[in-house]
Amino acid sequence: MYGPDWDQVLGLLPPPKGNVCRVMMVGASVAAHFPNDVLERALTTQYERQGFEIINAAYDGYEARQEVIVASLWGPRLKPDLLLSLDGTNDLEHRLRGKKAGEFYLSRTYEAFLSHPLLAPLYFLASHSQAYNAMLRIYARRGIGALDAVEQYSDAIPIYTDAQKSLNQLAGGMGAARLMVLQPFSGYKSRLSKEEAAFTVFKYREGLMKALYALASNQIAGMSKRDGVPYLDGGSLFVDVADHIFTDEAHLTPDTGGLSPARQSNRDDLGFCLASALFALSSAMHIVVRCWNKCALKRGRSGLEPLYFGAVCDPKNEGKRSIADQLADMSSAN
């Protein structure tokens, strides 16, 4: 259920030092294997005078409700300035494997382990067998409905959105800012690399996953506007990118998450887009404003106005001043 030694790793971390902004990231494998230093570097590139600390509390296979458990157990101890979730794919894709919404897709496997312990080693070997998994995929092709049957699987979306709502409330209770990110999905990519074009194992469900992604994104976007919580739809982030990005439906190549020396000089490059556009543009605004207000309170200065995320929630601006403008004004005044 939890990462190795998380009681020690997460539970015993000291409070952040000085004006360092602590980011707690939850999610599944994509978030778990996203290099912390890449995100920290992207944030500090945007805001050179601000320190950042990334606490990665994501774990392979997680769904959003498991993230809620992790955030509720360790969040109050960590006292993050920002609670960031990068998720969505597992919450939708696992529904295609289960018979009903909310059912963990490995429940029947674990039940077999517990019911027949003597056969458990054989079950384990079978679950890691390419032949066995190939048969499962053939069965899945027959079991998954057509695109017009998306309603059959859309009952997973309220569970996902309820979990996001819970994370929002937890963040509020901890006094932390909040950012919801729907993770990228390969099905939206129009310019496939040679490797991506050759990966056709899950092609049969791509249309259905895209339909579920669209429904989920609409629900989260609505929540974002109602609750004033920033949301970034990363599902189609790489739609026009020709580089090799995905190793399967949702997992990214190692180079995608990083900034190689050759790429660091080009801010329009793919790695910078993921680390900066996906995270920094919104999360850094939340973090910087929160930390600025902390420091301003200590120094007897005025803080920033409530956050406004024009690019995320309100592209029309409606006459509100952006955080960037406020920061510029305060910097020149001080």
Image (tube, grey):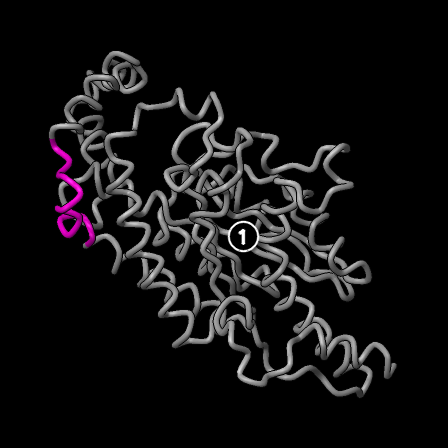
Left or right: 255 as drawn, with respect to 187 = right
Q: Position of residue 34 (x, y in %)?
A: 57, 40
Left or right: 290 as drawn, with respect to 318 = right
Q: Is residue 315 above or below residue 218?
A: below
Which quadrant of the rendered structure holds the N terminus?
Answer: top left
Type of amino acid under label 1: Met
Q: Residue at x 30, y 13 (%)?
A: 130
* Nearer the observer, 38 or 248: 248
In the rendered structure, which segment of residues is drawn in magenta?
A: 143-154
Q: Position of residue 129 (x, y in %)?
A: 29, 13
* Nearer the observer, 280 or 13: 280
Q: Residue at x 47, y 63 (%)?
A: 231
Residue 187 sits in quarter: top left
Q: Is residue 189 above or below residue 52?
A: above
Rate crowding at label 1 as few (under 14), some (14 to 19) or many (20 or more) other CA atoms within 10 Å.
many
Q: Position of residue 120 (x, y in %)?
A: 24, 19
Left or right: 191 as drawn, with respect to 38 = left
Task: Give the labeled residue for mark 1.
Answer: 25
